[in-house]
Image: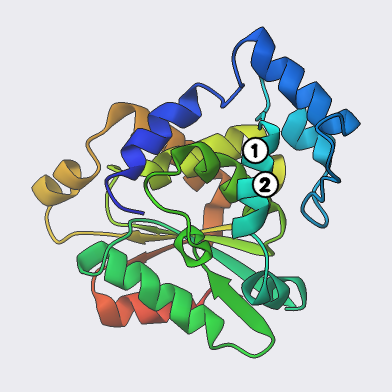
């Protein structure tokens, strides 16, 4: 995920709770079908989980439900549904450097037999749809057999994603693999991972993942690290 996701992380921190009585009224109307149309929510996703107005859960308006449904459908979602192993790959975006290496991990996992590798961007979510990133990420994570984090630093929206899911979904702790880059000198290591809040989140994740934290330092060792993910 690219640097624009940092904005998503700050939005995510507010919980997407549809603040205001009018937003809650629209949510309730949508659940009762008062808007006049039949609302087809995502297959396998509990409508109540997405429309719960409690402050500790994600809330979507009916319009957001429809936009999310438009993104998370079609052949790509069918591939996930019918694959034995389903890998959600988390990390920086972009076409160069960390983003390219993350895409490499996705492709290596996707090439496996009876497996599908995917990233949030594969479903067409743009940087202008920040309100949908958190619920889309949560839904895809719930459908995954593995969540694979490709870490090169603690600066980006992917740090928030992993920290959020760690606190909200204990299941993630059991399916999470972290492919963490290590650097050749202490100064560089400190520079890449010098982010107090992110470091505390990731330290908890690393403790939970235990032996599922695999280190690498270049592209060839990254490929070998991917081989360790079952």
Residue found at x 65% / y 90%: 113
Q: Give the image location of residue 104, x and y in percent.
A: 37, 77
- Residue indicated by mark 2: 66
Residue found at x 82% / y 25%: 29
Q: Give the image location of residue 149, x and y in percent.
A: 46, 57
Residue found at x 64% / y 54%: 141
Q: With 200 as the anchor, is 98 left or right in this view?
A: left
Q: Give the image location of residue 181, x and y in percent.
A: 29, 61
- Seen in the picture, residue 201 relative to 103 is either above or below; the reply is above
Q: With 70 as the anchor, is 157 left or right in this view?
A: left
Mark 2 and mark 1: Cα distance apart in space: 5 Å
Q: Residue furthest right?
A: 32
Secondary element under disc 1, as helix, strand or loop, is: helix
Q: Quadrant of residue 114?
A: bottom right
Q: Residue furthest top?
A: 21
Q: Looking at the figure, which quarter contains the C terminus?
A: bottom right
Residue found at x 66% / y 77%: 75
- Is residue 55 in view? no
Secondary element under disc 2, as helix, strand or loop, is: helix
Looking at the picture, tell me which residue is in the foreground, 39 or 199.
39
Q: Which mark is residue 15?
A: none
Marks 2 and 1: CB-CB under 8 Å?
A: yes
- Is residue 37 in view? yes
Looking at the picture, tell me which residue is in the foreground, 39 or 202.
39
Q: Residues within 10 Å of mark 2 (few under 14, many from 20)?
A: some
Q: With 8 as the anchor, is 111 left or right in this view?
A: right
Question: What colouring method underlies this structural image?
Answer: rainbow
- Residue indicated by mark 1: 63
- Seen in the picture, residue 121 relative to 110 is either above or below; the reply is above
Q: Residues within 10 Å of mark 1 (few under 14, many from 20)?
A: few
Q: Looking at the figure, which quarter contains the N terminus?
A: bottom left
């Amino acid at each position: 995920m690219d640097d624009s996701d940092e904005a998503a992380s700050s939005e995510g921190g507010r919980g997407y709770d549809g603040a205001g009585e009018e937003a809650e009224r629209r949510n309730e109307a949508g659940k009762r079908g008062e808007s006049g149309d039949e609302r087809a929510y995502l297959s396998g996703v509990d409508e109540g989980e997405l429309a719960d107005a409690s402050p500790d859960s994600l809330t979507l308006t009916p319009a957001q439900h429809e936009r999310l449904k438009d993104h998370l459908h079609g052949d790509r979602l069918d591939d996930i549904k019918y694959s034995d192993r389903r890998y959600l790959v988390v990390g920086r975006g972009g076409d160069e450097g960390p983003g390219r290496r993350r895409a490499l991990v996705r492709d290596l996992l996707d090439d496996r037999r009876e497996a599908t590798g995917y990233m949030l961007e594969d479903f067409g979510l743009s940087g202008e749809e920040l309100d949908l990133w958190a619920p889309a990420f949560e839904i895809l994570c719930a459908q995954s057999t593995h969540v694979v984090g490709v870490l090169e630093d603690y600066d980006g929206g992917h740090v928030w994603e992993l920290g959020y899911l760690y606190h909200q979904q204990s299941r993630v702790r059991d399916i999470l693999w972290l492919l963490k880059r290590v650097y050749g000198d202490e100064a560089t290591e400190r520079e890449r991972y010098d982010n107090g809040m992110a470091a505390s989140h990731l330290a908890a994740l690393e403790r939970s993942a235990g032996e599922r934290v695999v280190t690498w330092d270049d592209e060839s060792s990254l490929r070998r690290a991917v081989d360790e993910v079952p």
